[in-house]
Amino acid sequence: MMKRTLMCARRTLSCSTSSSHLNIYFLSHSSAQYHSIRRFSTTFKPNEISPIHFPYGESYFPRIRREKRFYVDKTHIIPFLERSGNVLFFARPPRWGKSLLLTMLEAYYDIKMVNEFGELFDGLWIAHPKHQTQLKNQFHVIRFDLSITLDAYYQSNGKGISNSIKQSLYDKINVDIKHFLLDYGLDGTTILDPHDALVSFDNLVSYFRENKMKLMVLVDESDRIVHKFMLEFPLNYTGDAVFSPIQSFFERIEQESSSNSDFRALVVGITPLLLFDSLGRQFATDISHTSQFNDAVGFSKKDLERAVNDIGISNTDHKHNVLSAMYKYYAGFYFPGSVEPLFNPQLSFYFLKKLIRDNTFRRDVIEGKNPTVRDMMDENVKIGSSVFDALLEFQIFKPILQRCTSTNMVDFLGLGYPHTDIYPSPKDILKPPIAYVSNKTVWNHLLSFMYYHGMLTLLPFNLFGEGTLVVPNEIAKHQYLDRLPDILCMNNLYIERFINDPTEDRLKQLLKEFILDPVFDVTMPEDGLQGSFEAALNACSSKLFKLTSNREYTQIGGMKPLPHGSSVLIETLNNVIIIEFTRIKLDSLEEYENFHSLYNEPITPVAFKSEFEDLLYADEKQLLSMNATLNSTFIPLHQPEIITNQERTTVEDIFNNAVIRAKEQHASNNEKNKGKTIHTFVVVQVGWPLIVRKVD
């Protein structure tokens, strides 16, 4: 069981014990021994190894094994697959190695590759006779790739889309069946129907059933066409017209499996979009959330260590720095049952190949120079702009994005909303029935979509249940920040004006116009305001200042703890700006203590302003006189529950304590930054309105 430790008793201002009150630091996904990057001068010459040793973008298992290229053993899942059912479905995000998994299974089960078993599987787990199953090399294996092109029916401008998709799909299925028949030397004259691929498939399975031969069907890119159509050509997306032809094919697979014990199938995709028919029935057993398959794709830390050794980096300090860079930017994905973070294989190969090819990059990394996000970013693995554009069609996605950039965490709404049931019906993914469903439902649908696309991931433990998702790593966070200025309608000129001339009015204007008014959700956790401010400044990518935050972080597992506090430090050439943030959530105010139970879904700025006019128009004196609840929330060592201690106080007392903390930081920075002007502010958010005071 993962160790859970406490950094400090955290000061919060809400009665809620939601997981979103804990800000997750990305290095929590990394081993503690790699937190600090060692810096030193060194020379290093890698092994005489070609960059193609790492099969970036390649997925054909036999070629990778014959050429002795890098391969991470996944054969341990084979016995579990056989015990899980005759027709299985497995979903993982894009570019995670699903195609390679299929070609490995094809090589294991293919009857015509029986004589190559030793060459292909030598040294792998399944090579041991005790691990092999009775079905080894017992099947004729046909592999379908459903990544058909869009041109034919995109040009139809929405007319006859169903027939166009159907014909393109049928042509692709028939081509795959034809290649299969040629590979096995089978006569296709009585099998292939050039006009109807489903008839061809029916003829194929009938032939194998009548001749008592085993047939295995592997389907890759099962939902690729649906996602491309839905995201890239949304105006022509018509739901059933896109789904129906593919679902008809899957229904044939289900029908055959129900009556033929010699028939097996595995379908892989990004999401379970096509797992259900129009009546909600599954055509396959979904193993995506089964713990035995949590590492069916992806790399572990040990896998990366082996890759670094293959390059020839054996020196402890060299290896430490290389792995530190990978852990910082790439670690963080957890799937159901994961006990350690998994790494995207293509991102990992991108880095490793760059390490071999780019002498300057390699020298900087092994010397401990921290690479930039752009150094580590693979354009082919980025979240597509079409995905963001589709999500931004929903106003409720904006507060989701703000939470992702400010706290790195976001919760499903509603008690006991498990990730295993988070996917709605196919029609509701990006076209939910918003005319009659709540924001909460749309919110959950969008989080589900983001989880399956690798934009969010699970927590690495069950401390808060399965209702919380987190941004996996710095690479993902960077892509969110890229879209934030558009959502906030940010103008860097206003930020630069405040940085160059820090005043109360300019700080208040920044917070109001670029954080609160565009998108701020009042149900955000305590650090939401400060986090949103930090994200906005980071997103502007200005070189005029350096931003440092010492927000409170709870230590969980191997996380590197940050200094206790809740302030932002902005350093320029001549100035240091200190902003002490305190957020009093609405349900921490005595007058609104029932707010959380009444409003358990996101609240837009427009909705809030119409509902809480009295609070919005309260003057500073009225705000300071309000009663509030001050809580201390912490996680005891080795205990899974959160403990909260409550204390009654006033907004004025909370404000005065913030002033004391701010002045302490002011004095400390006066000593450290002699010659610079120190500007110190206190910002207290009272439900929604702000009290902003310059206290230096």
Image (tube, rainbow, N blue to C red):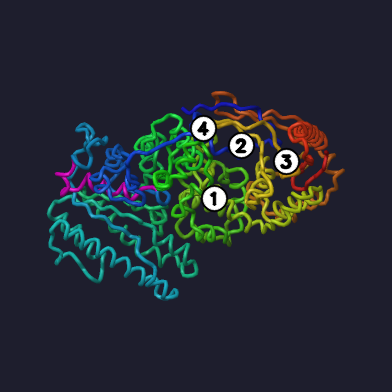
Read off the magenta span: 96-117
On screen, 286 above or below 648? below
Type of amino acid at the residue the image marks with label 4: Phe
Which secondary structure, mark 4?
A: loop
Instruction: Using the numbered discs, state the Cα–Cα distance from disc 4 to disc 2 in whole angstroms.
Output: 35 Å
Contact check, label 1 and label 3, Cβ < 8 Å: no
* Label 3 crowd (10 A; few <14 / some 14-19 / many >=20): many
Which secondary structure, mark 3?
A: strand
Which secondary structure, mark 1?
A: helix
**Residue 331 visible from this viewpoint:** no
Which label's residue is closer to the chain start, 1 or 2? 2
Say which mark, if any, is on residue 40: 4
Horizontal and vertical percent for residue 154? Answer: 42, 71
Q: Is 254 colored magenta in this rendering?
A: no
Which label's residue is closer to the chain start, 1 or 3? 1
Q: Is 113 colored magenta in this rendering?
A: yes
Disc 1 versus disc 2: nearer the observer: 2
Which residue is depicted at the point 58% across and 43% down? Answer: 408
Please give the residue where the numbered disc 2 appears in the rendered image.
Answer: 22
* Label 1 crowd (10 A; few <14 / some 14-19 / many >=20): many
On screen, 307 above or below 62? above
Please give the residue where the numbered disc 1 appears in the rendered image.
Answer: 444
Say which mark, if any, is on residue 583: 3
In the shown orientation, is residue 186 left or right of residue 420? left
Which secondary structure, mark 2?
A: loop
Instruction: Using the numbered discs, state the Cα–Cα distance from disc 1 to disc 3 in whole angstroms.
Output: 26 Å
Which label's residue is closer to the chain start, 3 or 2? 2
Instruction: Using the numbered discs, state the Cα–Cα distance from disc 3 to disc 2 in whole angstroms.
Output: 14 Å
